[in-house]
Amino acid sequence: DIVMTQSSISLTVTPGEPASISCRSSQSLLRSNGYNYLDWYLQKPGQSPQLLIYLGSTRASGVPDKFSGSGSGTDFTLKITRVEAEDVGVYYCMQALETPITFGQGTRLEIK
Amino acid sequence: EVQLVESGGGLVQPGGSLTLSCTASGIVFSSYWMHWVRQAPGKGLVWVSRINGDGSGRVFADSVKGRFTISRDNARKTMSLQMDSLRAEDTAVYYCAGSPDYSNSIHYWGLGTLVTVSS
């Protein structure tokens, strides 16, 4: 199974400041078609998860452009340009390359 | 608007059985792979199972293989998870989720239904 590791369990950010969350996979998520099969999800308090980024860097429908995904192979980053109170929650990376689908353990974003 | 609505959760004794259902609206159901993802209280997300668009392909996490069965009825836009031989560690909120055909990226999630396995 592909193991997904998020380096930070939690992150506290001042409103208006940027944030960065890292994720590493135990094997490459890059396919020969050039796509990285890495997704980012946000689970806000008391809510279901929601898709933010898929294929490494494509924003899902309705996701503001303050969220961006980057990286390739085994190392990926989710960036938020200016954190707001509504961004609070747990961010998960997930490999979509193969089954079993696996998630990182999550990074909790809190506001200072 | 896309909606995935789960039902069937509840309290069940260890060794018992339970069937979860998911009803979809707002999507071309047969064009979506459907998943179950669970989350134990206070824990992270764990993928459980997937069924492809026409129901011909089913995949399970090792932790549930041989105990859980997944099925779908495209005419009724429903998906089910039959859970047998339930254990305490199966206690979780179970989310119904959908990804476009040939993709595992989960674009749609239900609100979840709680399954508690306890005596």
Image: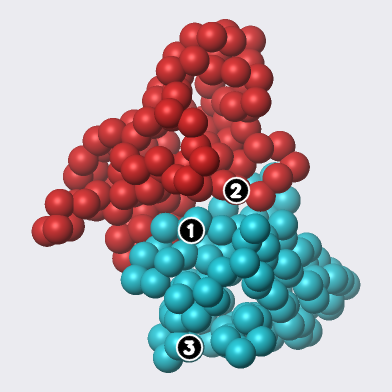
Query: Which residue corresponds to the image point at 65% horizontal and 20% vertical from the top-left?
Result: A85
In the figure, the shade used to draw chain B is cyan
Q: Which residue is mark 2?
A: A49
- Secondary structure, mark 3, is loop
Rendering quarter of residue A31: bottom left
Q: Looking at the image, which is closer to me, B79 or B46? A: B79
> Label 2, label 1: how many angstroms apart (C-alpha)?
9 Å
- Secondary structure, mark 1, is loop
Kind of residue indicated by mark 1: Ile
Whether B84 is drawn above or below B31: the answer is: below
Instruction: Please state the horizontal and vertical placement of residue B89, each as a whole percent of the image.
Output: 67, 65
In the figure, the shade used to draw chain A is red
> Circles 2 and 1: CB distance less than 8 Å?
yes
- Secondary structure, mark 2, is strand
Q: Looking at the image, which is closer to me, B47 or B111? A: B111
> Circles 2 and 3: CB distance less than 8 Å?
no
Q: Residue furthest left?
A: A32
Question: Can you tell which mark lies on residue B55?
Answer: 3
Mark 1, residues whose alpha carbon is within 10 Å: few (<14), some, or many (≥20)? many
Q: Which residue is mark 1?
A: B106
> Label 3, label 1: how many angstroms apart (C-alpha)?
18 Å
Q: Read off the chain for label 2.
A: A
Kind of residue indicated by mark 2: Pro
Q: Looking at the image, which is closer to me, B32 or B80? A: B32
